[in-house]
Image (cartoon, helix red, strand yellow):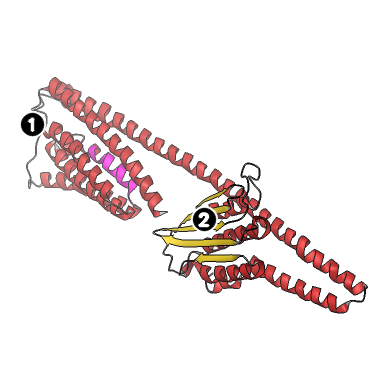
Amino acid sequence: METERLRETLAIIDRTVLVRRITLGSFCILAIAVLLSSGISPLNPLFAVPFLWLILTVPFEHLVHRQRTLRAVQNVHAAFFVVEVLFVGYLVHRLGGVEWIGVMFYLFTVMYANFFLPRAAGYLVTGLAAGSFATVAFLEYFGLIPHFRVFSHQGPPYRDLPYVIATVLVGGVGVYGVLAFTVRAFADLFERKNRELERRRKALERLSLKLLHAREEERRRIARRIHDEMGQALAAARWALAAGRTEEADGLLAGLGEALRQLAHELRPPLLDELGLRAALDKLLDDFAASTGIAVERALPEGRFPSEVEIAVFRVVQEALENVRRHARASRATVEIARRGGRLMGRIEDDGVGFDRRRISEGLGLPGMREWISLVGGKFSISSAPGHGTVVEFEIPLRCDPSSTADHER
């Protein structure tokens, strides 16, 4: 989840870096237009600062993509906002302080900060922006820093053509145009996010449906066991009693009781909760070898895993072995499960008769196995051919420390 959020945040930042560059580039173009139309010196910060601000986005983007956690990305972003506040504060100071439209220049920094950063950090950047403007205003008021005038008015400002042109281009066209572009960019981001949420909602619905299918497949398997094994044993015991063969009936009922205990164990093996995946699989494989005479080679992992992963792996191995018992006519089977990095890899193989996938695409409990692995975010595959055995493989991501047992204490 953390990795996914980091990837989404970086994608949004890349989008907004592009927006920043477009907006700052627009300001640079407007600045050149003001320069050409008003006779203001090209050394004025009105022109220099937007260019420097635009250049600043290059190291910022580089630093952001070097971070490996969401918190680190937010810290770099917060540092960038602080630098922006300093840039804007200097720009406001050189552009007439409270005389002109400098207070508007903090707008985009405040918007981005409250969009990207946690609430407290967003409020902090907002406070820094307000404090920066107030500091410039009062330092000029008390004469502690010099006051710079951008325009030398010959009469009322509204009759000064350079002032009117600069105000309309920078304040009207510039600020409002860039504001509209930025808000539209945010709206597009929210729309994309909503589409992604809708996609995930539909995926969750599909996954829920798959879970129902997996449960139905499990019910069919249990019903098959009860009908084929226990129902026949019960009928035979009844016939034996009717014929007066009590000793034979006792044997059949004892076998039926053992079959019921075995079924209960398969439905929810106590060892899976108490000792974990390895112990439960060891017992399952031992019972399978004893009841079928099929030799089972094994390589099983140590430690505990998230409970949903342990259940899914156990069910897949259980169903794969049931297929070997009923259909494979195998003499040997291999179960290999290993933890490799952040993933759990599994392989169940037999040397049986195999089958044609084109003719049995959804039989042999394949939907149930596939959905168990899908429910824990894994990948499932099965390969087989007539006369060449069957191989079931799966790969499951481990989203937490595999040695932790916290996920099992429920």
Q: Position of residue 389 (x, y in %)?
A: 58, 53
Residue placed most toward the observer, 342 or 202: 342
- Quarter of the image that includes the C terminus: bottom right
Residue placed most toward the observer, 375 or 140: 375
Amino acid type of the residue that numbered disc 2 sits on in the rendered structure:
Val
SS of the residue at dot 2? loop
Q: Which residue is mark 2?
A: 376
Picture quadrant of residue 146:
top left
Amino acid type of the residue that numbered disc 1 sits on in the rendered structure:
Leu
Give the mark count.
Answer: 2
What range of the chain is rendered magenta?
A: 105-117
Residue placed most toward the observer, 406 or 190: 406
- Quarter of the image that includes the N terminus: bottom left
SS of the residue at dot 1? loop
Q: Is residue 159 magenta?
A: no
Q: Is residue 107 magenta?
A: yes
Disc marking residue 43:
1
